[in-house]
Amino acid sequence: MRLIIPDAIKSIVPYPPGKPQDELEREYGVKNSIKLASNENPWGPSPKAVAAVREATGNLHRYPDGASYYLTQALAAHHGLGADEIVLGNGSNEMIEFLVKAFITEGLEVICSHPSFLMYEKFTRMRGGNCQVLPLAGMRHDLSAMLAAVTDKTRLIFIDNPNNPSGSAIAPAVLYDFLSHVPEHVVVALDEAYIDFADAGLHLDVYSLIRNTNNRCAVVFLRTFSKAYGLPGLRIGYGLMPRQVAVCLHKVRQPFNINSLAQTGALAALEDQAYFNEIIDKNRNGRRFLVERLSRLGCDPLPSETNFIFFDIHADADRLYEAMLGKGVIIRSMRAYGHPSCLRVTVGTEAENKRFLAAIEECLREISRV
Ligand SMILES: *Cc1c(COP(=O)(O)O)cnc(C)c1O
């Protein structure tokens, strides 16, 4: 074998796979560990979605509907848009990939923030594109730096709003002003994976931004069933966008990218808005509780519009992370994101939040003693 690997691929660092939970338990000698590290919905999806998926297993010998007709129609009605303004992806991750595939070739440019979602840069590098990665300013997207970074080679700007890992959202007035200044040849992708958890006042006018494209850049909204809807295992997300953009994304899409269980499960989850609203309320209560208790512990949590909290222990985050593992509580150190004294915790169930707080109180004492 004599592989000739393109430079664009050679330079990519693979996404480090997390250890399975039972593997960690064995390593640390703990049982009943809780995972508050991946911003998952701890209450799970709507029982109606689970029932629908179970029923759909009877048809696995058939190819899925390549147009995802029923789910697309339901999403169109839900958002007050046309079916031709919606594209579905195998997770919103695939939507990011579609955008890059459709608009980036070698030498073209993408702008995004750091810390932020790592996939924007990864897909861009795979295509031989250049990614301008701009640091957050005060843990917020630096929109003026983004505007200043636009060149005639820029094709895409990715903004996760709310941002992961800070949990902050951009005030709509600020974002509207930014969008009105982005040159028309650029597509702005707003990754709204966590927008469901944000205050209603922070939601943008999706309809106007998609329909009014005269003298303005195209805006694409990325949404997912992985967070509030609790279905990351099915891999289903979608984008809302001007139809001219949707036409391009359909060209780079595999015909059967959305499997039949994902189509059925997402549709049932979308239809159960009562359950969805319950989840949003539970998350808001858990988030308020955690922010208040973390503040009391001197951990300076950032205000969050999401289902996770970024906080600063003013000590070595990796050591706290390890100590917490010893107590069977999995959270995430932000050292790899450039914040060596910060961590991120996902809002859990009431019982999980209490266990997390009890563990962190003990661990903070332990690591400051030695
Ligand atoms: C979790 C997350 C997503 C969701 O990705 P899926 O592929 O839909 O599971 C997207 N963007 C950000 C910033 C996220 O944190």
Image (cartoon, rainbow, N blue to C red):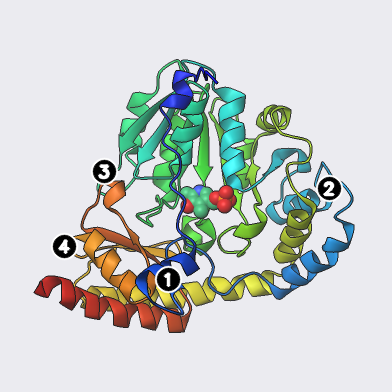
Residue 253 in picture, x, y percent from top left: 71, 33
Residue under label 2: 64
Which SS class for mark 2? loop
Q: Which mark is residue 12?
A: none
Query: Spatial distance from mark 3 to mark 2, Cα to Cα?
Result: 44 Å
Between residue 312 and residue 315, name the one nearer to us: 315
The first of marks 3 and 4 along the sequence is: 3
Q: Label 4: few (<14), some or many (≥20) within 10 Å?
A: few
* Residue farthest along the left direction in this orientation: 369
> Callout 3: helix, strand or loop?
loop
- CA separation, marks 1 and 4? 30 Å
Q: Residue at x 37, y 39 (%)?
A: 113
Which secondary structure lies at badge 1?
Answer: helix
Between discs 1 and 2, the one toward the N terminus:
1
What whole-number distance in Å separates the C-alpha atoms at marks 1 and 2?
39 Å
The residue pinned by badge 1 equals 26
Image coords of residue 62 (percent x, y):
89, 49
Q: Is residue 319 above or below residue 103?
A: below
The residue labelled by disc 3 is 137
